[in-house]
Amino acid sequence: MKSGDIVHIGFEPMRGRIAWLDRLKIVAAFAVVMTHIASIPWQVLPASSTAWAISSVCEVATRFCVPAFFFVTGALLLNPNKQIASDKLCKYIVRTCMLALIVSAFYVLLELSFDGWRGWRYFIYKTVDGPYFIWYLWVLAGVYLLTPILRAITSDRNLLTYACAVTFIFIIGKSTVISMFPGSLADIAYGNIIIFNRGAEALFYCLLGGWFITHRLARRVENGLIGAGFASLAIAVYLNWKQAVLVGPDLYYVARDNALITLFSVAVFICISRWGSSRPLSRFETVACKCGIAIYLAHPFFRLVFERLPMFSGALQLLMDFPAIMIPLVSFACYALSLIVGLLFQWLIRSVRIRLRR
């Protein structure tokens, strides 16, 4: 394979799509569902139990999901072969912010339906603050806002490589050092020099996607990264268990900005880029990849219903007792229901647009 072939890997000429990126979106959408289902027993079971260990493996092994979303976003937005008009980016920003507020308001109302009304001030505050997963939309809007700058960086290979290295060292390195050596001089230095948040993590993975879509490493290097990635997964699983035994479950070793999860995420990206480029998308894959954001936003509803409604208490107990079987089953059910919601919303939007054009 020649180095220049990277841009064309997985392209479907009739539609100009990159097949392996679409497949990565599908896998990431299912992984984000599974990580949130696995977190139910992971948060409450004793770390010494086999059931907790199984849920921990599922939790850690699916943590590449959100990095994958930003990786795909960067690969698509920063692809030099595609032009993106500024007015289109503005529409993306407005729509994403509106979606964040609407979905957040829905989930706040859902929470209040269980816990009781707490007043308009609480409702407005919680809507702006958002549930635990809404942060992704606000960060995505920020990525759209910075896309012209990121595209300028991507156009220069040396500058892009430098930007990836710097963000890796200061963002990924910060979390890794603090988690493995709390209270160290590096911890203090990072804390005093600069503070990074989720937006900075997203920029790293977007830049990585931009680098990956325009360049390709030698196959032996990629093979080494795959090996290192899966070794990192094993180390993260062990450290996650050790941390839980000592002080209780913690997200130190499953965070997106931990070097172990980053290496594992890169391994997943490489594997899917190889496996997912050999054939065109099936009809199901074409539908599923378009519903990725809907699945991300809808699955917490089904997770909440599963946890809170008494009618599912038996299934919830089965999840605690038999996680090896129930985590995949509940995840598939939640994914399928969320996919149906996404299809219904797509149909609704098309119907509204047709009526408005008349």
Image (spheres, grey):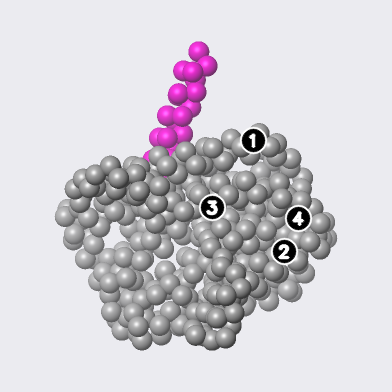
Would you say 98 lies left or right of 299 here? Answer: right
Residue topped by disc 2: 163
Tell whether label 2 touches label 1 (CB within 8 Å).
no
Tell whether label 4 touches label 2 (CB within 8 Å).
yes
Secondary element under disc 4, as helix, strand or loop, is: helix
Residue type at numbered disc 2: Ala
Secondary element under disc 3, as helix, strand or loop, is: helix
Q: Earlier in the sequence, mark 1 or mark 3?
A: 1
Tell whether label 4 touches label 1 (CB within 8 Å).
no
Q: Is residue 20 above or below residue 124?
A: below
**Can you give x and y, in whole percent of width and height, for residue 265 in the image?**
57, 67
Residue topped by disc 4: 153
Q: Nearer the viewer, residue 273 or 75?
A: 75
- The secondary structure making up most of the magenta span is helix
Instruction: Report, in whole angstroms, how far the alpha carbon at label 3 lies from the one at label 2.
Output: 19 Å
Secondary element under disc 2, as helix, strand or loop, is: helix
Q: Residue 139, which numbered label?
A: 3
Circle 3 Cα neighbour tier, 10 Å, few/some/many (<14 / 14–19 / ≥20):
many
Residue type at numbered disc 1: Lys
Q: Is residue 178 above or below residue 296?
A: below
**Residue 156 in magenta stretch:** no
**Can you give x and y, in whole percent of width and height, for residue 48 in the image?**
31, 84
The segment highlighted magenta reads 339-358
Q: Earlier in the sequence, mark 3 or mark 2?
A: 3
**Can you give x and y, in whole percent of width and height, for residue 23 in the image?**
57, 52
Q: Earlier in the sequence, mark 2 or mark 4?
A: 4
Instruction: Report, in whole angstroms, how far the alpha carbon at label 1 lies from the one at label 2.
Output: 25 Å
User: Can residue 296 be seen at all in this image of the molecule?
Assistant: yes
Residue type at numbered disc 4: Ile
| Quarter of the rendering occupied by the N terminus | bottom right
Q: Quadrant of residue 247?
A: bottom left
Q: Residue 88, which numbered label?
A: 1
